[in-house]
Amino acid sequence: MNLTRKFSVAVSQAGGITQKKLRRLKGRRWKYPLSLERRYATAISRYLKKQWQEYMKMAIAVMVPRSDAIDLEDSVTKGPAIGAIVTIAEDFDKFNKKEMDAFREIAVGDAFLQDEPWVQETLQRWSREQVSLITKASQDMKDSVAKRVRNGIKRGLLNTEIASLVLREMPGISFRRARIIARDQASKLNAELTRGRMSDAGLETYVWETAMDERVRGLPGGRYPNALPSHWIMQGKVCRWDDPTLWRNAQGEWEKRPSSAPYSHPGTEIMCRCVALPNWDELMEIPSAGPETQAQAEIEKAQDAVLKAAVAAGYVNPASPAQDTFAKESKRARKKLQSVLARTGK
């Protein structure tokens, strides 16, 4: 175990990981950002639809059978499109951080503050990859339209008949492509953020968690019972971040995964909906700090909350309605500090 000192000290000051805490940690499911994935799929679908519809109008008007014969600007890197990608990336990050904070709050008593300089670079890299993927998808949609225009010309169809054919077939094609991109890329970003935040805390192992539904690859009786590699056999397995080919067997020893298992981390294979749960058993090795140390740590946290609330209130115009919100927050923080001082006898 290689827990970062800051996190291990926080766990120790919070009384260590008791059996009660461990039950709460293991009983909480790590949520998947399904609503964000669907929102991203919708945004991609709208963009692709706009692109192929504009191309269709121009191609049919001049009866051009090749997509590269029409100069139609693909503006993924401009305007609302890139803005939507950046916004959704930030929302994925907020969702993932909220999930990790919920676990850490159980472990240390409140959301553990951790500098994350790597997050911005991760989001920027992911956003650049989305531009590439969506640009490629847009071109593929135009090629599909061009193919239908070409076939229509060969068959001697009228312009209106070709347009009707395209409008009947293309919406489904572009929506399915958008859904595949969104699901695959949402999983990959969620997996990368999860690994980064566990690494920040020094957690070297994780528990593989599937989506636990009929679509899990390799699930007997499910939709894809014969899928290989099987993700179902990974359910509940303890794995290592530094080697995706190993898992811990029933004897607690590390061994090579079978050939039917994936040699990867959750969420990294195409369309994988699995997630990595923190292996909180690692924290059982951290000793509990003494009562005096725990009490002092609790007081310092309460004092820090009072200070932060006061500083935040100082930046708000006294005439602003938001001042009431910060005033209430300051009052709540002071009340909690008084309660802690009374309980600890300080």
Image (cartoon, rainbow, N blue to C red):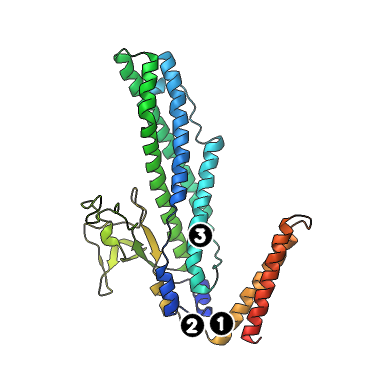
Give the label on residue 294, or none.
Answer: 1
Placement of the N terminus among the 4 image quadrants: bottom left
Residue ID at (22%, 55%): 221
Instruction: Give the residue pinned by disc 2.
Output: 288
CA neighbours of label 2 inside 10 A, class few (<14), some (14 to 19), many (20+)? some
- The image shows residue 46 at horizontal and vertical percentages of 47, 35
Q: Are marks 1 and 2 in contact (CB under 8 Å)?
A: yes
Give the label on residue 97, or none.
Answer: 3
Residue ID at (46%, 44%): 40
CA neighbours of label 3 inside 10 A, class few (<14), some (14 to 19), many (20+)? some
Q: Secondary structure at mark 2?
A: loop
- The image shows residue 308 at horizontal and vertical percentages of 67, 66
Q: Is residue 189 visible?
A: yes
Badge 3 or badge 2: first in the primary sequence: 3
Q: Is 139 drawn above or below residue 117 in the view shown?
A: above
Residue ID at (55%, 70%): 110
